Amino acid sequence: MEKYNHNEIEKKWQEKWEKEGVNRAENSSKKPKYYCLVEFPYPSGDGLHNGHIRGYTAMDIVARKRRREGYNVLFPIGWDAFGLPTENYAIKTKTTPQIVTKKNTDIFRRQLKSLGLSFDWSREINTTDPEYYKWTQWIFLQFFKHGLAYKKKVPINWCLSCKIGLANEEVVNGACERCGGIIEKREKEQWMLAITKYAERLYDDLDTVDYLEKIKIGQKNWIGKSEGALLKFPISNFQFSIDVFTTRPDTLFGATYMVLAPDHEAVEKLKSKIENWKEVAQYISQAKKKTEIERTTEGKEKTGAELKGIKAINPANKEKIPIFIADYVLKEYGTGAIMAVPAHDTRDYEFAKKFGLSIKEVISGGDIKKEAFVGVGKLVNSSGFNGLISEEAKEKITEFVGGKTTTTYKLRDWVFSRQRYWGEPIPLIFCEKDGWVAVSEKDLPVELPKVEKYEPTDTGESPLSKIESWVNIKCPSCGGNARRETDTMPNWAGSSWYYLAYVMQGISDFQFPISEYKKTFNHWISVDWYNGGMEHTTLHLLYSRFWHKFLFDIGVVSSAEPYKKRTSHGMVLALGGEKMSKSKGNVVNPDDTIKTFGADTLRIYEMFIGPFDQSVVWSRESIIGPHRFLERVWNLKNKVGEGEIDPALEKVLNRAIKNITEDIETMGFNTLVSELMTLSNQMEKTTISRKTYETFLKLLAPIAPHITEEIWHLLGNKNSIHSEAWPACDFSKLEDSTVTIMVQVNGKIRGKFMVAREMDENEIKNMALELPSVKSWLKDMGPKRIIYIKDKLVSIVV
Ligand code: ANZ
């Protein structure tokens, strides 16, 4: 067999495509637009990993197909380069994050180019470029000006080893998401973004987008919408009442005690009458130390303290019930206070058992001696409401006690400050007289100053706070002495709007005012198809949807959602199913694979390795298969004859066109590859016409762009195969009008006959029984059963 020199061929075409700018998107075009987006990588020191390659190759296939279907395609790439690993590495190696970033992006760029991905490199972006974060800062200022960025003292999750405050979402199982280190609660003034103001729209608008169902569910769970009621519980001997939020007002008659979050404001107000204040105060200080996750984990032993000397009044039956503080109730959710219904809520049940509180059944259907019955059902022990079903009772009981139906969300406002160096400076200035003042737009970007030392501080101040010459500044409003904000933005900021940055990047000298460019934004936005890792389908996706909706509200963009469609690929794992990581030494370096087997082979392998949405295990042995396949494709060119088109082959070819066209849309990339393999097997068996071979190459081109381009030119074609129209399926070649029906008697084939496709079942059964060969087997016995499998088989049992 003739070998093909992948190294030479791949390099040659990559250079030519780049020189000719074949993948550039046009800002104005008569063609319809299509915007394909992949998650831009964080340029870590490990280089590109196989998970990136899997997702990027998939979208590359889509982008290539769209171009050939006549679309003006935008398929861009860039670097999400702010973040802790770079900063930590710079500290360790005594360089600067700027230098580390430059080095890493150079490696990533080279690697991505060596894969032949059809990115529009003219639009490359980097979130750490001052010309980029100028706009991140500009968007932040718009939030600030619209009252959606505010400073608040919040208990933050402080990672002792990263020395950084983390958002709740960044705390996983009570530990730091980045380093796995210990988290402590600390009170700190932080910039917050009011994402909760958008909770309802972020939830409801999921109905308008085409995301994988599991992604929609993930988003919904983060937002955590709950429909329920606010009910007032008067406090005896006090002139006020406490609101509780409940999703089950139908269980009100079973509320046998009340629980407040340990940090609920009412505790202070009740203090004078609390008989066991010492015990209560001690419990409060203990609870402070725990993270939210520790507090709320199911099945954990419940703790609490009763507020002795004080009672609440159940508004339904006027019974006096005890009040507790307990850490399973969170201050930030609902009203921070609950009515406890131990018969019908698991956590309340555990708590009541431990503290010997009364458990009163009000919904029938369970066995409350054994466990809480959390289902809905008929009301009992509920006075005039007995016999109603839960749904009805919810409304009636809420009305009866003067409550209010309401919707709550689990989503919290977003802690937006970080006390680290390698992030976007928050463009605000504090003046004693004017308070917080925005940096003027003409002074953006507020550049990160070059510093000697950017180690985090133990006091929790940002390292920027030590650079007096940078910090001290005149107030833009009154001209008096003022100080810059020294906190920086979280690493989520730059990626919250980057799909817009690619559009801006295509406009030379993009400037204020943004409204001038609305036409170009409107041409490209929304993104038509966005693929990325499953791990980014909650936070990043939610944050960027939030920013987009805000930009929509202030008139920058005209669509309510940034991404029309979102899909996800499964991870590529190391042998043994472990995550690939440098520290485990099990990373497969794509450079080696490309050198040995070629980018085309690697691309096919990554697509062939398993169902796209599932995790797969990398294996070097199995990469040989795709490589041999390409060698056979290469050799097929020597078989091309001018002879008649083989009708059988034509049928296989048209079926492949149909299936591959569909496979790309449904991300069935592994079946796409098998389809191509089957087709090439068929071609090896007969003479092939040039047209058949060329069509085959056109189908293979999106996944193996180099080898197909090379053969295409060897066949004498002058244009690029990647600008050839996408093959259309000739359906008349596909379907035979007749089918062959096999006939079995007692499980053995005894005959066959041809009929028209879709013929009536009874007629076919009769024809089978009339067949001479079948008749001889049946002799005089009547058949016991006849089974028909459409267009395939009649099975007779005697
Ligand atoms: C009484 C009740 C009876 C409840 C019952 C449930 C079952 P979701 O669905 O997650 O929104 N709750 C309310 N605020 C809370 C807080 N700050 N911390 C902890 N728990 C809180 O849950 C709503 C339910 O969680 C509410 O409904 C309340 O308990 C509790 F048979 O009220 B329920």
Image (cartoon, helix red, strand yellow):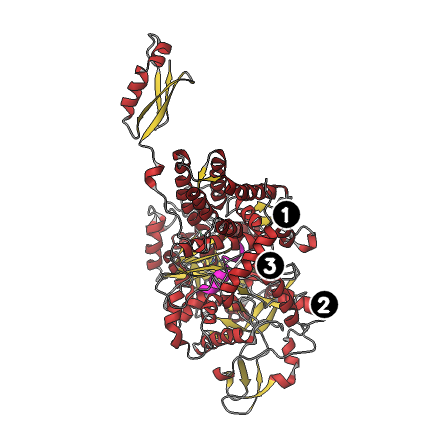
Of badges 2 and 3, the one in the foreground is 3
Q: Quadrant of the N terminus?
A: top right
Residue plotted at (65% across, 71% down)? 99
Instruction: Give me the disc on residue 111.
Output: 3
Q: Kindly report the distance in space between the C-alpha atoms of the residues bearing marks 2 and 1.
A: 28 Å
Which class describes the residues within 10 Å of circle 1: few (<14), some (14-19), or many (20+)?
many
Tell me the SS state at disc 1.
loop
Extreme residue toward the right, this view? 93
The residues colored magenta run: 533-545
Left or right: 577 in relation to 776: right
Asked whether 20 or 352 is in front, the reply is 20
Magenta stretch: includes residue 600: no
If you read the primary sequence from the N terminus, does the residue marked by circle 2 or circle 3 appear first?
A: 2
Of badges 2 and 1, the one in the foreground is 1
How far across and how far down the image is residue 688, in percent? Answer: 45, 38
Which class describes the residues within 10 Å of circle 3: few (<14), some (14-19), or many (20+)?
some
Instruction: Give me the disc on residue 574.
Output: 1
Name which residue type carries label 3: Gln
Which class describes the residues within 10 Å of circle 2: few (<14), some (14-19), or many (20+)?
few
Q: Is residue 315 visible?
A: no
Tell me the SS state at disc 3.
helix
How far across and how far down the image is residue 509, in percent? Answer: 47, 77
Q: Is residue 272 visible?
A: yes
How far across and how far down the image is residue 713, in percent? Answer: 49, 52
Q: Dominant secondary structure of the magenta stretch?
A: helix
Name which residue type carries label 1: Ala
